[in-house]
Amino acid sequence: MELIRGTVVGADRVAKNGDTANKIGTYNAAVIAKRHRVPFIVCCPVSTLDLSIPDGSAIPIEYRPPIEACLVRGRIVSPVVKVEENKEAAQAIVQITPDLALDDHGVFNPSFDVTPSELISAIVTERGVAERAPDASSIPISEVS
């Protein structure tokens, strides 16, 4: 990790305290950056800052259809089925979960995750940079809104 000096991501929404919502995996990246003491910076346009939302728990999160998290697709690999040169291999879609998981309650498939401001070093907009103080639990985004 010595070669990585910082992590920069975008945001779809930023709450008043600096919590951010972005594509799934952003929270994981922030946790890893914190673990390795690498600055985690969010860059976003001012239009994503929402001072009416107090914190990440109030950011509306969209959910994808459960079936999307239950299927994998890939090339059929078999010693019996040979793919001719310049032809595409056959594809298969396989369900990797029990049928029970396909109702609306069996699969959690959000489009976004929320990264708490405690994991964010700074938020950068076209109007400036709002940094989190070392012991602070929020970021003063009103400075850059």
Image (cartoon, rainbow, N blue to C red):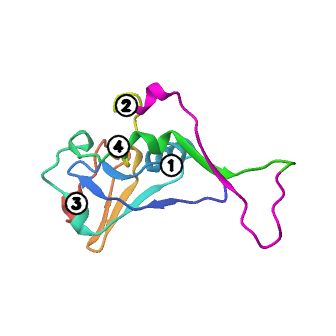
Give the percent coordinates (x, y) of residue 46. Answer: 24, 68
Q: Say which label, 3 or 4, has the lower sequence index.
A: 3
Residue placed furthest toward the top: 100
The amino acid at mark 4 is Pro
In this orientation, does residue 1 appear? Answer: no
Residue at the image point whose x is 25% and y is 62% from the top: 48
Q: Say which label, 4 or 1, has the lower sequence index.
A: 1
CA gap, disc 4 to disc 1?
Answer: 12 Å
The amino acid at mark 2 is Asp
Is there a contact, CB below 8 Å, between mark 2 and mark 1?
Answer: no
Residue at the image point whose x is 26% and y is 73% from the top: 127
Identify the secondary structure beneath mark 3: strand
CA gap, disc 2 to disc 1?
Answer: 30 Å
Query: What's the magenta region?
Result: 81-102
Identify the secondary structure beneath mark 1: helix
Classed neighbour count for the residue bearing mark 2: other residues with Cα under 10 Å, few (<14), some (14–19), many (≥20): few
The amino acid at mark 1 is Ala
Give 109 or 24, whichever is nearer the viewer.
109
Give 27 or 98, whichever is nearer the viewer.
98
Mark 3 = which residue?
Answer: 49
Classed neighbour count for the residue bearing mark 3: other residues with Cα under 10 Å, few (<14), some (14–19), many (≥20): many
The amino acid at mark 3 is Leu
Q: Is residue 112 left or right of residue 58?
A: right
Identify the secondary structure beneath mark 4: loop
Residue placed furthest toward the left: 52
Which label sits on residue 103? 2
Classed neighbour count for the residue bearing mark 1: other residues with Cα under 10 Å, few (<14), some (14–19), many (≥20): some
Say whether residue 92 is magenta.
yes
Which label sits on residue 29? 1
Nearer the observer: mark 2 or 4; the answer is: 2
